[in-house]
């Protein structure tokens, strides 16, 4: 599960694309998404808003029209294999040398 302090731009993987109280919301199991921002939600919870999926507006009494994000437990961080991480580090070092 991702955390409430996950910074914008972080790539995450969907691990739960099941329908919630307002429908499926457009998630695809196993798909990569980019964190737009994480916000405090109703009832003291946190939700993530994604660049790739437009946020839904729903009516929630007594608050009225609210922006719905996705529960943090629906995602996990993108784990890169050590070999790929090493390649990315080498490529960054080579670009900095130019």
Image (cartoon, grey):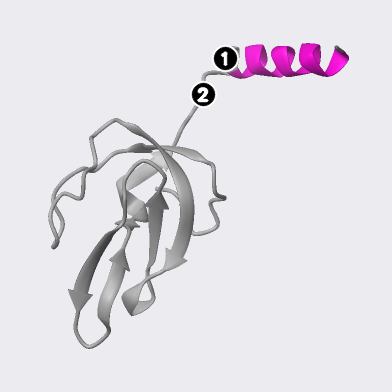
In the shown orientation, is residue 57 left or right of residue 89? Answer: left
In the shown orientation, is residue 93 left or right of residue 19? Answer: right
Tell me the crowding category of disc 1: few under 14, some 14 to 19, or many 20 or more residues within 10 angstroms, Cα based. few
* Residue placed under numbered mark 2 in the picture: 80
* Residue placed under numbered mark 1 in the picture: 84
Instruction: For mark 2, give the secondary structure.
Output: loop
Q: CA distance from mark 1 to mark 2?
A: 6 Å
Residue under the point 71% across and 13% down? 91
Q: Quadrant of residue 23?
A: bottom left
**Residue 2 x/y as whole percent:** 44, 49
46 over 92 or under it: above or below? below
Residue under the point 23% across and 34% down? 29
In the shown orientation, is residue 26 left or right of residue 86? Answer: left
Q: Main secondary structure of the magenta part?
A: helix
Total numbered circles: 2
Magenta highlight range: 85-97
Q: Quadrant of residue 52?
A: top left
**Residue 74 x/y as whole percent:** 30, 48
Mark 1 and mark 2 residues within 8 Å of each other at the beta carbon: yes
36 over 42 or under it: above or below? above
Residue under the point 28% across and 30% down? 30
Tell me the crowding category of disc 2: few under 14, some 14 to 19, or many 20 or more residues within 10 angstroms, Cα based. few
Specify the label residue 22 is tagged with: none
Q: Is residue 17 magenta?
A: no
**Residue 42 x/y as whole percent:** 33, 76
Instruction: For mark 1, give the secondary structure.
Output: helix
């Amino acid at each position: 599960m991702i955390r409430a302090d996950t910074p914008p731009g972080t790539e995450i993987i969907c691990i739960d694309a099941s329908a919630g109280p307002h429908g499926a919301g457009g998630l695809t199991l196993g798909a990569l998404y980019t964190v737009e921002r994480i916000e405090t939600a109703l009832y003291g919870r946190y939700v993530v808003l994604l660049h790739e999926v437009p946020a839904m507006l729903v009516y929630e009494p007594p608050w009225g029209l609210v922006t719905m994000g996705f529960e943090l437990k629906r995602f996990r961080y993108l784990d890169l294999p050590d070999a790929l991480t090493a390649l990315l580090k080498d490529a960054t070092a080579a670009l900095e040398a130019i």
